[in-house]
Amino acid sequence: MSPNDILYDINPEALRRIARNRRGFWAASLLTAMAIIAAGVAAGEGWLPWPQELSKMLGLGLAAAPGVVWLGLLALLVRDDEGTRRVATILWLITGALYLVTVYPLLTHLFQVDAWLSLAWWTDVLANLLIIGPLEMLLLYLILRYGVYPGETLHRLVDGPLFGVAAALGMAAVVSAIRIWPRPAIPPTEVWIVGERALTYAVLGGWLGYALARSRFTRPPGYYLPGMFLLTVLLHALFDAILRGANALAFAFSFFAALAVAAILGLMGFLLLAWRVHRQNQAILRMAARIEIIQERERPPSLLGDIVEMVGTQETEATHTPPPPPPAPAPDRDEDELASLKRSWEALIADQEGGQ
């Protein structure tokens, strides 16, 4: 099969459908980030009428709040695709449930990270780099790879980041709930800690989902997907180290230092992700245009077009054919009758003369 035959089988319109963006997803993510930052500032300044010590149930609601807000905004802003909204909600729930029965038991019972995680700053970094980050990112990868990658649910490039954010926010909600539940009372400062975690996990899930979507639609090199997985693990460890350092230095600078750092990291991560999705969509659209031009050039002439051209040629020839000569004038009927009467008279005279 020649390369032109392969290009002839590709549908340019299908490529254009892959490159369609979802502005509602980006708007929902930006508004959720702004709501997280605003809630953290309001809680830190005491502008919200919350008790000084939150109960456990309020703390669990706080842990789930970023994901619930994001899903609500997604439902309002992405109204043209109910299936995508439903899958995002299911991913949010399933990821949290699977974290409780897979990653959490491994961290607490097998590796027992809580016993040595806080011994020194380097143990914290090593734990996130070698154990926590790989396990959490592997769970996200497996859920996206076997949950949405094979089917028709992932039908746009931007759906990868969308589903990645949904799954990551479900994981962030459960991680926050695990940290909140053992405490007898939760201070309002936990508001921005939950927000920091939600922003970090959302960025990591968005990038991992983008890597999976690109590997499906654009066929990058074989090292691309493992490299992106390793990058998310490194970013997981880096973000955690930066945020822990900012929280540790809060007494010297401001209680909002960690929240500001998380906001900067989250917004930068989403801006870079949006830029990469836009660039890749533009490349797909250019490819669709080139394939369409090649297909038009290589397409055989249409049989219907040949018939129409033949009929037009015949009509043209018929139009230019000279008209036949006019018919000879018909003889006068009165002259024919006179000649016949004359012949009959002469015949009668000849018969009479012959009888005499």
Image (cartoon, rainbow, N blue to C red):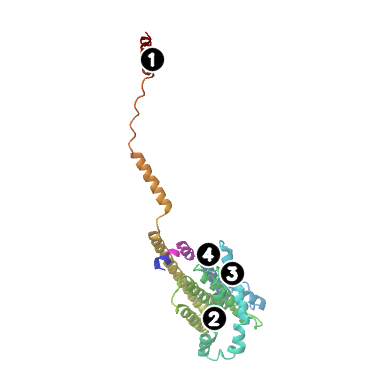
| Residue 138 marker | 2
Q: Nearer the viewer, mark 4 or mark 3?
A: 3
Q: Earlier in the sequence, mark 4 or mark 1?
A: 4
Q: Amino acid at mark 4?
A: Gly
Distance Cα–Cα, label 1 vs label 3: 112 Å
- Residue denoted by label 3: 87
- Quadrant housing residue 330: top left
Q: Nearer the viewer, residue 94 or 108?
A: 94
The residue beneath circle 4 is 24
Q: What residue range appears in magenta?
A: 7-18
SS label for mark 4: helix
Q: Quadrant of the C terminus?
A: top left
Seen at 49% across and 78% down, the residue is: 261
**Numbered disc 3: secondary structure:** helix
Look at the image and tell me whether residue 216 can be seen: yes
Q: CA distance from mark 1 to mark 2?
A: 125 Å
